[in-house]
Image (cartoon, helix red, strand yellow):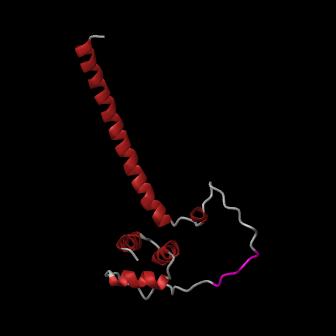
Amino acid sequence: MRTTDVDVICTTYDEAVNKRKAIMSLAKLLGVSPEEIIEKLQQNGRTISAAEPKLRKKPEVKEPEAPKEETKESPKAAALPMPEYVQDILFKEFGTLERKIDDLSLELEKTKEHYIVLKNYLFGS
């Protein structure tokens, strides 16, 4: 497991309201067992409360599978639901990028105006 994965695990767990759900979502997202997530949390100073419900795997009920058609518009990764915690982090980053784009667009407009003034002065349109 990468260091960035451990950082995401700790941050997500710390910010989660439902710690059990966070552990289960992280395990599913990273393709590891919930016990591995708990181990990483404990290695990084998090105490997992004994009052929290036990993490156990639900028995999987296999349904007959219909043939799956993969298209370019629906890659395999998109089939997995995105955990709310991950979605919150991504929305925060998205908002930050939007504000940055707005600031840069404003700066671009001011630069264009300055360019036009200098061009008109130098070449007299």
> 117 above or below 106?
above
Q: Is residue 13 visible?
A: yes
Q: 69 or 25, which lies in front?
A: 69
- Horizontal side, residue 89 vs residue 103: left or right: right
- Horizontal side, residue 16 vs residue 117: left or right: right
Q: Quadrant of the N terminus?
A: bottom left
> 4 above or below 97?
below
Residue ID at (46%, 66%)? 85
Residue 17 image point, x, y percent = 44, 71
Asked if residue 61 lies in the magenta stretch, the reply is yes
Asked if residue 29 lies in the magenta stretch, the reply is no
Residue ID at (32%, 80%)? 44
Q: Is residue 52 visible?
A: no
- Horizontal side, residue 18 vs residue 125: left or right: right
- Horizontal side, residue 63 vs residue 49: left or right: right
Residue 49 image point, x, y percent = 41, 85
Residue stretch rendered in magenta on the structure: 59-64
Q: Determine the image quadrant of residue 70.
A: bottom right
Residue 23 image point, x, y percent = 47, 77
